[in-house]
Amino acid sequence: MKNYTGFEIKDWLEDIAFQKWVYNQEADEFWQQFLRDTPQQATNITQAKVILLSVRGELDNIPEVELKSRVAEILAAIPEEIPEYKIPWWKGKWLRVAAVLFLTIGIGLVKLNWHKFSGSQEPYYTTIASLDRREITEVVNTTDHIKMVSLPDGSSVILKKDARIAYPNQFNETKREVYMLGEVFFEVEKNQDQPFYVHTGNMITKVTGTSFSIQANESDEAVRLVVKTGQVEVSTSNGKIGNGAKGKSLHLNPNQLVIMQKKGQDLKTRNVKNAVLLDLSIESADFVFKRTPLKDVFKALEEAYGVTFKFDASKISDCSITAQLGDEPIFEKLAMLSAVVNARYELKDSQVSIYSNGCKN
């Protein structure tokens, strides 16, 4: 095992195992234990993470000669001295390290996103880098299909490909806060006494229990939100709404869309015919069933949530459902179904196991 105790920032930047942890959470248990055992490395690790996350992105497949030329241009544009008050731990030396990082640690591990150096930096990455990793969970959907995440309060979250969400291992008593990037659908557990906040860059969404979609891709110039059910309150970090004047948050109802331009943070709203923003089946699903065979209900939930159901088909062949499940998170839907057909369920990862003796008296 490599001895990391004496690592400097430059060593962390070049360490492949560290990069895999920062970008893909590989060997997370090892790194969390290392931080607990070696607290003196916390500052170096945090600073290295910020550098790695600030250059995260995708490079086009361009010839090496052109690549080196573009790097040279970036380096030439970087001042020799960077003011202490702006980035007290970087100096010119470390910014240069970040600019040529992909040359020193190998193709495919860290790729530069050139627009990051023009002054724009995705707030999600810097926020997550500043949090205590021992107290939060971050989930990234690296698959080609949707991924369901169950939050500590029972809320359901659907991540599209490449989307990510970070949340505390346990919400505090007064509020529930999550951070996201990409395309995500939310079904929030109702709790008037514990508002639910979604931080999407500089847009803040507050709800107490509702369902909605957010589109906040890193490469997009705007963040979009559409409400499926309930009411949503939206504000920005600079407190501006509408034409840029200071004011209260915007309140949105079902089938209303809000768009926040990342530059300027102004909010604009409009009505839409339906709440489909991310092209997900759950956005248009009403979960209304009338004498529907239970296996078909399971199929509908599989498609909506990206989970799989495991059950004994012979045991539930005589079971049917008449119900409107609404916008409740998947846990509540499963609880209602189980009560109706006298069954019990277990949800582990993305598999739902159903245990039933059948519906005949």
Image (cartoon, grey):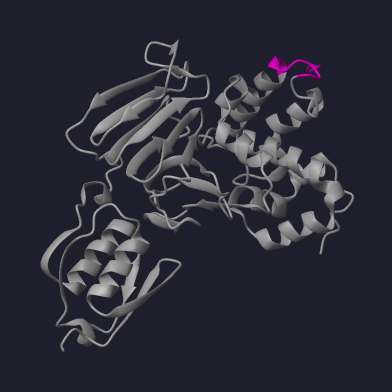
Q: Residue 28's spot in the image, x, y percent?
A: 66, 59
The residue at 19%/52% (across/down) is: 286
On the picture, is 96 further left or further right than 262? right
Please tell me which residue lies in front, 281 or 134: 134
Quarter that holds the C terminus: bottom left
Q: In this view, does 262 lie above or below 19?
A: above
Q: Is residue 191 left or right of residue 114?
A: left
Q: Nearer the viewer, residue 241 or 22?
A: 241
Secondary structure predominantly adopted by residues drawn in magenta:
loop
| Closest to the observer, 274 or 87 | 274
Residue 304 x/y as whole percent? 28, 57
Toward the front, the furthest residue is 193
Residue visible at 54% across and 44% down in the picture: 174
> Which span of residues is magenta-colored?
76-85
In the rendered image, is residue 205 in sight? yes
Residue at screen point 76% across, 15% down: 79
Q: Is residue 46 magenta?
A: no
Q: In which quarter of the image is the N terminus?
A: bottom right
Q: Is residue 248 above or below residue 348?
A: above
Counting from the top left corner in percent of width and height, residue 327 is at 28, 52
Please, which residue is most extreme toward the left here?
A: 291
Residue 203 % position (x, y): 47, 29
Is residue 55 among the parts visible in the rendering?
Answer: no
Give the vertical position of 227 relative to 236 (above or below).
below
User: Which picture quadrant has residue 315?
Assistant: bottom left
